[in-house]
Image (cartoon, rainbow, N blue to C red):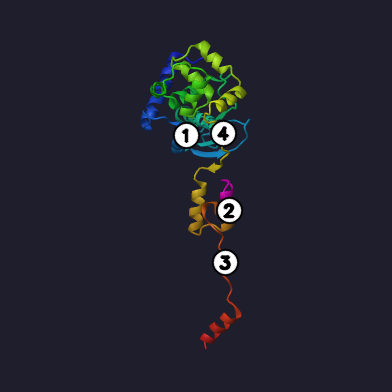
Amino acid sequence: MRKELNETEIKDIKDHASEKLGKCRKTNDIIGSQIFSILGLYARVIYYPFGKDAPWGFTRISGSKNDASLEKPFVAINTSIPVPCQVFAAAHELYHIWYEHNPDVLPSDLLDEDDKEINEKKANRFAAEFLIDEMMLRQEIDTYGIKKFDIKSVLQLADLFTVPYRAMAKRLFETGFIKVEEKDILLSESDESIARLRKRYAFSAGEADNRIAVDNLADLSVKAYEKELITFEKLEYLLGMCGLKPEDIGIQKTSGAAFPSDEELDEIMEGDE
């Protein structure tokens, strides 16, 4: 298995990222969690807590393998993982949607590329180029006066760009800020050590939010209920799929039409005489 991307492949990926940043009008902006809105433009997205050790996400182009005829593919993002990992997963999946049109599953060790297929390495490099644009990276390094790239500064930059620590360490190597030996030292830190240092330096942990969202199902369900196309019970069921209850969005169950009392019936009957 080929270990690294060649220069031609890297150039193509850089061009792809630059093109998409321009198309999304984000050439002078840090993407961060905006990636979820961008992903929503090109896919129907489900956010669900599958478990911290489960895949980071997956993409299904349509109901059958390698069928790219569906206008909007289906993407799932695992919200049991930290938000920076969700951000990276979303950008990774956008590469597959835009350039490969094939189904994809993101393993929980996505950032460990030693045994990954070349297309996964391409998607990871695209995610890094798209989320951590080199010009924006240089700008932030200058703004914060970062001179030494130790764990603290890498955590700081990862926090600014809302990406995983390991993705930022690799990106600093890709952009020439650190040498391969420095990258290997940064990557040799355990997840436990990185978590402790993140707390020590008071950087955002980007903890898993465990949110549940099924594309625009909640909004469509409410609209259908408001138009009296579905019952309250059906609304409850559909919102339940999104982890919501009707009262969460200000909808209370209304009682059905009450039967008239005996007195009201007598009055109605007397009125007919």
- The N terminus, quarter of image: top right
The answer to which image quadrant residue 207 occupies is: top right
User: CA gap, disc 3 to disc 1?
Assistant: 44 Å
Per the image, the residue denoted by label 2 is 236
Q: Which residue is mark 4?
A: 207
Earlier residue among tags 1 and 4: 1
Per the image, the residue denoted by label 1 is 33
Identify the residue position indicated by label 3 in the image: 256
**Mark nearer the N terminus (2 vs 1):** 1
Q: Which amino acid type is shown beneath numbered disc 1?
A: Ser
Q: Position of residue 10 (x, y in %)?
A: 44, 18
Do labels 3 and 1 touch, CB within 8 Å? no
Residue at coordinates 47% horizontally, 36% vertically from top-left?
Answer: 36
Q: Are marks 1 and 4 in contact (CB under 8 Å)?
A: no
The residues colored magenta run 236-246
The image position of residue 130, as x and y in percent, is 43, 26
Give the residue displayed 36% in from the left and 32% down from the top: 25
Instruction: Say if 43 sits above or below 144 in the image.
Output: below
Of 69 and 124, nearer the camera is 124
